Image (cartoon, coloured by chain):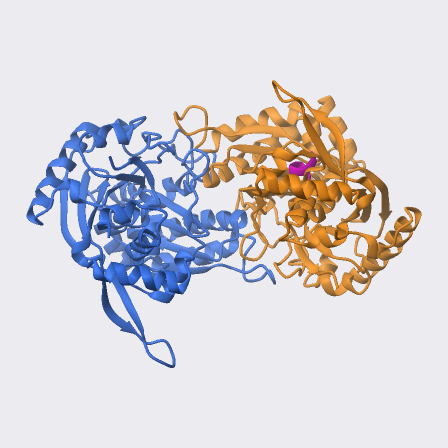
Chain colours: A blue, B orange
Amino acid sequence: MQNINELFLDHDSPAGRLVRGLAAFGAATAGQLSKSTGLGRSTVSTALTELRDAGIVIDVDAKASGFGRPSQLLSLSPGSGRCAGVLLGLGEIRIVICDMTHAVLSDVWIPIRRDYTPEEAADQVRDSLTSQCQSLGITIADLLGVGVAISAPLSYDGKVLNGDVLPTWAGVDLAEIFSTRLDCPLHAENESHCGALAEMTWGSTVGESDFILYKFDLGVGGAIVRDGAVVRGVSGSAAEFGHIVLDPDGAYCRCGNRGCLQTYAGGYHLIRRAEEFSGQPVTIDQFVERAREGRIGYRRFIEDAAEKAGWGMGITSSILNPPLFVIAGKLATIGKAFLEPLERSFNRHTLQHPDLPGVSAPRFVVAKFLGNDDTVMGAVALVLRQHGRIVSPAT
Amino acid sequence: MQNINELFLDHDSPAGRLVRGLAAFGAATAGQLSKSTGLGRSTVSTALTELRDAGIVIDVDAKASGFGRPSQLLSLSPGSGRCAGVLLGLGEIRIVICDMTHAVLSDVWIPIRRDYTPEEAADQVRDSLTSQCQSLGITIADLLGVGVAISAPLSYDGKVLNGDVLPTWAGVDLAEIFSTRLDCPLHAENESHCGALAEMTWGSTVGESDFILYKFDLGVGGAIVRDGAVVRGVSGSAAEFGHIVLDPDGAYCRCGNRGCLQTYAGGYHLIRRAEEFSGQPVTIDQFVERAREGRIGYRRFIEDAAEKAGWGMGITSSILNPPLFVIAGKLATIGKAFLEPLERSFNRHTLQHPDLPGVSAPRFVVAKFLGNDDTVMGAVALVLRQHGRIVSPAT
């Protein structure tokens, strides 16, 4: 019997496929594993016996499914492997280590100045990860992998595409920066795409294979998920919803154009408006709190933002006709005051509105991850699902 | 050896897969067939021998490929099968019959009043197809299939989705209407999607598996092609580019919303503006001719239309980051006067503009089919590729 590290990276053997299947699900029945891997029931059964004997797979719970004996729920042994998720954010780095049951073992948040260099970040990640691993009695080399979520679009070969949010990172090759510092497989993906992966693994869209995620936070971003995979586009910059141009004469945007959706519905721009209004500094959390309370001014800020948000989503629907929209980000925590005008606006700016018979209007759900957990947990999911670009394969 | 009708519908046998492969390509080498079907070279070779012996496959030409012996180009025997394409358009029905080398054997155009009923159309199609087949010495039952292109979105089960262009057709079940009249397999698809299929089969995107087609004609429509297949969305109304809302306070659109792209860049709306300007009736062809000549007024009409067209395409690019845009429809025949301002506008309304490093800007090509041939030939391609919804399987 191989050890879990080998099985996790083995893309062909039945045991390897089951290990990755369980890693992605957290817990599953033999029947679910047979369905998701495409392996026959008897092959699954034989491989599971081996994996149980090796201490890699354990029985965790029983799941009742109608009549008959409840199906045994299986999981990877918590100790059989660990993986890490890293968020390279705007002014912050966050590093999480999870075990194979998806339990968070270590969670460190490091504030860092806004224009940090890639080398500084990689050093910080190495140092923090080393001590986090140490406290768990392992080394970085023992990790099944490190997933990196970054606040910028990425090319297929792991290069940071533009300096919209992280100006000092444009053109940086993530493999080059991190592989010399981290001695384990690396995966990287844009943070919005990681958010979608987190929702698919732990959140509101478990079992959904087609949806569009819109994240309204400091910026506006998102992800398009089709057939269970994130759509990246030819150069990795698909789903840049924040840069849907709503008014060619609108406010100037960081991308070089004008009137982009995020200049109306992005937290940064809303905060700036709130500060002008109140004459005081306003944080995104204060903004959200005041909007939720329906305070004068703020109610209008959020209504106007929702109007533009619904318009952008309406356009997206006319183009892609998705069955489901997931709304994420801090603005989603405002609740009704944001979501109701958003949905009203959506119906006025899409072909898929309820008045047109036969053209099904999409469902709307609020994401489960509404803070910053989505991105760092999505980075963990990158490793568990091996979805992301492998910027440094295991040596 | 089976006959070609059976092979064409047989989705599993190597011979069946080769027949459909050749039907889609028109002509191909054994190597190309091996690649496109995924069958081994020796399997392909054995099946081709059988198909040659049965008179279904013929050698048509030799293709030089660098050094060595030129590869033999193969085709289905012209007489081995025929298929028909039907366009149900606005005020017209067009019916084409092709042989298996993609040669057009019969092409009939029937003007019909704008608000024709589905029953009238189906009767017309049956009558015309019957006499077209008769003149070729065959019957409708001998056809490998009939592809139907319709100027409306279609649901997955072959229902016409809304009455935007064909108001009398909303909710109509195409299978119900046509299967009682046509005794052969039926396929149906939205006309813009058929246009994309025609470009993939005979036009400017042969061999391209990812592109977005924008058609600027009387209306504005298009198709999203991903991995070689048309993206339909959950209810068949994806790629409704004409209904991208550019101004919530703009002109009222047939879809019930305001300021849709086609109210700026659709031929109907442009003609209306030209008629107001000239005080005379103007046809779409006159409009195109005058715009191409750069006549006063028309030059501005087309510049303004191109400005909005580029804006809509820019938004589409920010959402999907495609490698290639194909521009089709009568407005594309205007040439530079339309295409140059369109591309300038595109760059000002997308994230994928040439000034942002790393975010690759898409290529632009003009479609090969610029008249109405795209839709009816796409309907033929529907049968050849068996891409569309089968609304009435062979009995």
The residue depicted at 17 percent of the width and 32 percent of the height is A181
Q: In this view, does A31 lie to the left or right of B201?
A: left
Q: Tell me where residue A263 appears, x and y as whole percent.
A: 37, 40
Q: In this view, does A56 lie to the left or right of B101?
A: left
Give whichever of B339, A380 is nearer the camera: A380
The image shows residue B285 at horizontal and vertical percentages of 78, 33
Q: How many labels does the image show?
A: 0
Task: Residue at 65% x, 23% y: name it.
Answer: B336
Q: Relative to the observer, which residue lies in front, A29 or B302?
A: A29
> Toward which corner of the image does residue B376 lie, by quadrant?
top right
Q: Residue furthest bottom?
A: A67
Q: Which residue is drawn at 49% across and 51% down?
A: A314
Asked whether B201 falls inside the magenta stretch, the response is yes
Residue B297 can be seen in this image: no
The answer to whether residue A338 is seen in the rendering is yes
Magenta highlight range: B198-202
How far from the left and from the top, in percent, is residue B357? 39, 25
* In this picture, residue A188 sits left or right of residue A365: left
Foreground pick, A347 / B144: B144
Q: Picture quarter containing residue B277?
A: top right
Position of A383 relative to B58 (above/below): below
- Prevailing secondary structure of the magenta residues: helix
Locate residue B254, reporting x and y percent.
65, 52
Pick the quarter of the image with the C terminus of chain A: top left
- Is A55 part of what is drawn in magenta? no
Q: Nearer the viewer, residue B263 or A273?
A: B263
